[in-house]
Amino acid sequence: MYLVAANWKMHKTVAETLEYLELFLPSVKDIMKVEIMIAPPFTALSSASIKLDSAKKEGEYNVQLGAQNMYYEDKGAFTGEISPLMLNELEVDYVILGHSERRHIFGEKDSLINKKVISAVEHGIRPILCVGETIEEREQGKTLSVVERQIRNGLAGVERDMVYIDIAYEPVWAIGTGVNATPQQAQEVHRFIRSLINEISRGNDEKTRILYGGSVNEKNARELIKEPDINGFLVGSASLDPQRFYKIITEVMEV
Ligand code: PEP
């Protein structure tokens, strides 16, 4: 099933999160064909979790909750970090790991991201491992080798657990820039990722979605989702508006 995920980054207070869900949830009631995920900031996770829970008691919703990051230890002296147990308590379903902003602004390396991926899988939280090349790497023809390194290192030790993991291909040059990868550029990398995860998981990758992320919006979603190896989207800016996010979901539903 396609997955369309919203990464709100450092946007929206608790009040704004609830206001968004109030508008958004009725529009996606009974949409079962596409799985939807929303990743608000940590401070709004608890309220969002309660809101989603009560909506699910009243109707059919295929809307899951995601965190934007987590640390790999259960507890301890790690000031400012959030543990998988804390996410479990809030019934968080997904966690975005290795986002390019974590890699490039906060200096996260493959080895740290790998520990987080392992921990998420162990705690029953589905990681979305983000990978992608910078513009310099693309220009030097290194796109596939960078993506391969990030995937092999990020998934080391959990290759056999591929059924519990999703991947997001997010070229760094396309994130938040308004310049998306063309469907052909994205498909080329997605096809490569599919064959790579098929190889490392020994064929157990059929439940793994490969999402595209990078300036996805309601206008380019249709062309991108037509590509055979694009299994959904990770959406930043355009997910901040409930109507735009809903429109992207409807484009995916029509495939
Ligand atoms: C993202 O941050 O994951 C992302 C894809 O952002 P945007 O859609 O704004 O490019």
Image (tube, rainbow, N blue to C red):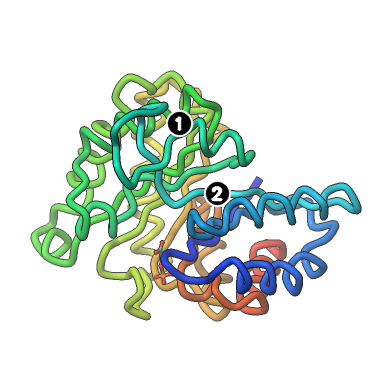
Q: Position of residue 78 (x, y in %)?
A: 29, 37
Residue at image mark 2: 66
Residue 239, located in which quarter of the rendered image? bottom right
Residue at the extreme left: 140
Three-letter amino acid code of the residue under disc 1: Ala
Frontmost residue, 94 versus 227: 94
Q: Position of residue 80 (x, y in %)?
A: 33, 47
Vertically, is 238 above or below 59?
Answer: below
Residue at the spot x=11%, y=65% of the render?
136
Residue at the spot x=46%, y=38% of the render?
127
Residue at the spot x=72%, y=51% of the render?
50
- Some atom of ligand 1 lies within 8 Å of the CB belonging to the residue at label 1: no
Q: Position of residue 99 (x, y in %)?
A: 34, 53
Residue at image mark 1: 120
Ligand 1 shows up in the quarter that is: bottom left
Q: Quadrant of the N terminus?
A: top right
Residue 93, located in which quarter of the rendered image? top right
Three-letter amino acid code of the residue under disc 2: Gly
Q: Quadrant of the C terminus?
A: bottom right
Vertically, is 45 above or below 174?
Answer: above
Frontmost residue, 114 versus 16: 16
Question: Which structural element holds mark 1?
Answer: helix
What crowding class fits label 2: few (fewer than 14 Cα within 10 Å), some (14-19), or many (20 or more)? many
Residue 247, located in which quarter of the rendered image? bottom right
Label 1 or label 2, whichever comes before in sequence order? 2
Q: Is residue 101 left or right of residue 209?
A: left
Frontmost residue, 207 versus 237: 237
